Image: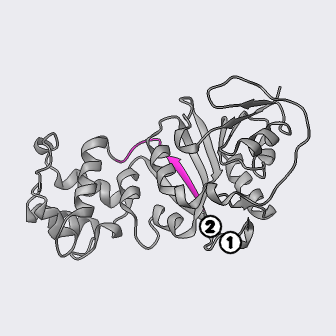
């Protein structure tokens, strides 16, 4: 049975005719994917993963319908009730269409894979919610090109990436030209793959993430001075770490890799001090 779930309701809609509208609603930030090669590439990446699929921003089903052919359970989330209703009338029985805001959607607790053409203006908000969720094991997201690069640490990692790097791998798979969307956005997209690490690089999530935020927002002429000023490690310890990790004295926080962040935390944060709160400014 095809299902269309209305917000706060168990009502099921079935039957009727499906219509494809390629133009998105501007107020919803909708730029629909229309390039068959990109759609096929996303499908190939999802095919490498196991388990149920949660699609974010299903639209008219450009990704939903190809993904449904894998025979896996698919939950397609779409904020526009008209598009969600039309899509629900055309999907096979293994697909559930949920009319909901992505930022309020509750991700399943069981293992699953997330896929979606994410509205560019909501990318950071969606990423924060997704990274804090526990159930998903892999995600394939179409985001703004520069965002995809920053999330993967290409040309310098963002603070959001560094905060979550010990628990997730980020990888840019390809650049998607603006002409692959309707309507075409002003910038290109990027295909970003995220995978949960089987073994985290760091055990202490809260203290580590607080540490990264302090370093990213700290003052100093280069990373070593910033870490020293944080008051949690002496100069010799920090410089010994830098030599071992092959980090230049005037490198910036954005220049570190996931492994370097993890080693910075392990090697310069004394065990006796990790439980103490950071000093206030």
Q: Position of residue 57 (x, y in %)?
A: 66, 48
Q: Which mark is residue 52?
A: none
Determine whether the residue tagged by mark 2 lies in a helix, strand or loop: strand
Q: Taking 267 as reference, is 276 above or below it? A: above
Q: Quadrant of residue 36?
A: bottom right
Q: Position of residue 11 (x, y in %)?
A: 73, 24
Percent x, y of residue 33: 73, 60
The quadrant of the rendering that contains the C terminus is: bottom left
Task: Identify the residue at the far top of this view.
Answer: 10
Q: Is residue 275 left or right of residue 91?
A: left
Q: What residue span does the magenta drawing correspond to? A: 191-201
Q: Quadrant of the N terminus?
A: top right
Q: Label 1 neighbourhood size at 10 Å, few (<14), some (14-19), many (20+)? A: some
Q: CA distance from mark 1 to mark 2?
A: 7 Å
Give above or below for 113 relative to 160. Answer: above
Taking the spot 21% from the left edge, 74% from the top edge, the residue there is 222
Mark with earlier residue (1, 2): 1
Q: Which residue carries the number 2 mark?
A: 189
| Of 44 and 220, the residue lying toward us | 220
Q: Tell whether label 2 touches label 1 (CB within 8 Å).
A: yes
Q: How is the image coloured?
A: one colour
Closer to the camera, 52 or 4?
Answer: 4
Of residues 2 and 83, the one nearer the viewer is 83
Q: Is residue 73 left or right of residue 253?
A: right
- Residue displayed at 79% across by 36% down: 71
Q: Which residue is mark 1?
A: 178
Q: Tag 1's secondary structure?
A: helix
Q: Is residue 192 magenta?
A: yes
């Amino acid at each position: 049975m095809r299902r269309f779930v209305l917000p706060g309701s168990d009502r099921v809609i079935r039957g009727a005719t499906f219509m494809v509208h390629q133009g998105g609603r501007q107020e919803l930030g909708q730029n629909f994917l229309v390039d068959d090669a990109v759609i096929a590439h996303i499908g190939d990446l999802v095919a490498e993963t196991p388990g149920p699929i949660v699609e974010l921003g299903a639209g008219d089903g450009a990704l939903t319908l190809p993904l449904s052919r894998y025979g896996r359970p698919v939950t397609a989330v779409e904020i526009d009730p008209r598009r969600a209703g039309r899509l629900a009338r055309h999907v096979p029985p293994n697909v559930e269409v949920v009319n909901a805001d992505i930022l309020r959607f509750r991700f399943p607790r069981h293992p699953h894979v997330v896929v979606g053409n994410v509205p560019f203006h909501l990318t950071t908000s969606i990423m924060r919610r997704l990274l804090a969720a526990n159930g998903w094991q892999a995600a394939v997201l179409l985001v703004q090109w520069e965002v995809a690069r920053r999330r993967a640490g290409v040309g310098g990692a963002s603070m959001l990436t560094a905060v979550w790097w010990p628990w997730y791998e980020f990888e840019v798979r390809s650049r998607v030209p603006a002409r692959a969307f309707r309507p075409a956005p002003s910038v290109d997209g990027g295909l970003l793959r995220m995978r949960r690490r089987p073994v985290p690089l760091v055990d202490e999530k809260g203290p580590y993430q607080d540490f990264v935020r302090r370093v990213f927002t700290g003052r100093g002429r280069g990373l070593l001075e910033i870490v020293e000023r944080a008051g949690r490690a002496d100069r010799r310890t920090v410089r010994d770490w830098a030599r071992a990790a092959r980090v230049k004295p005037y490198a910036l926080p954005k220049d570190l890799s996931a492994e370097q962040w993890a080693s910075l935390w392990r090697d310069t944060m004394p065990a006796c001090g990790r439980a103490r709160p950071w000093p206030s400014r």
